[in-house]
Amino acid sequence: QVQLVESGGGLVQAGGSLRLSCAGSGGSFRTYAIGWFRQAPGKERESVAVISWSGGNTNYADSVKGRFTIFRDNAKNTVYLQMDTLKPEDTAVYYCAARLPGGLYGSWGQGTQVTVSS
């Protein structure tokens, strides 16, 4: 089964940008749809963006449409989340996960912290 590791989080001012990476190893990374999720303190985890195995289809949460872009490089076994025009409400731990057969997400990474200061 694929293993996923997130990186790229950090502290940024409102209006700034960050690019998160989700690197896969083991398994057939390029055959999985990959989702980015986030969880803020005291809140439930929410889906941010999803990309199909080929990269041809993407979906975004309404709260990030027009500001975030998900894309992948299967040659590098990596999915990226480009985050622009960041807002303080984007502050959360961001996770990536693979959509497994059956539709559930698994192989969760350890998460990367994103903090947006006002």
Image (cartoon, grey):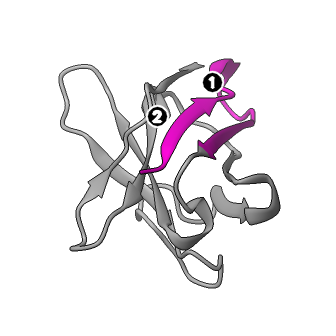
In the rendered image, the vertical position of residue 93 relative to residue 48, given as above or below: above
Q: Residue at x 71, y 35 (%)?
A: 15
Secondary structure beneath label 2: strand
Q: Which residue carries the number 2 mark? A: 94
* Badge 1 density bin: few <14, some 14–19, many ≥20, Cα 10 Å: some
Do tag 1 and tag 2 residues touch (Cβ < 8 Å)? yes
Q: What x and y, as percent, mark residue 1? A: 41, 51
Nearest to the observer: residue 62 or residue 20: 20
Q: What x and y, as percent, mark residue 36? A: 47, 50
Q: Residue at x 58, y 59 (%)?
A: 29
- Distance from Cα at disc 1 to Cα at disc 2: 8 Å
Nearest to the observer: residue 105 or residue 49: 105
In the rendered image, the vertical position of residue 110 relative to residue 99, given as above or below: above
Q: Residue at x 69, y 20 (%)?
A: 12
**Amino acid identity at mark 1:** Gly
* Badge 2 density bin: few <14, some 14–19, many ≥20, Cα 10 Å: many
Q: Quadrant of residue 118?
A: top right
Q: What x and y, as percent, mark residue 24? A: 60, 46
In the rendered image, the vertical position of residue 88 relative to residue 28, given as above or below: above
Query: In the image, is 31 to the left or to the right of 39?
Result: right
Whichever of callouts 1 and 2 sits on the residue coming sooner in the sequence is 1
Q: Main secondary structure of the magenta part?
A: strand
Secondary structure beneath label 1: loop
Does the magenta portion include 22? Answer: yes
Q: What x and y, as percent, mark residue 33? A: 48, 69
Query: In the image, is 43 to the left or to the right of 20?
Result: left
Give the residues in magenta.
Answer: 1-24
**Amino acid identity at mark 2:** Tyr
Q: Which residue carries the number 1 mark? A: 9
Nearest to the observer: residue 35 or residue 65: 35
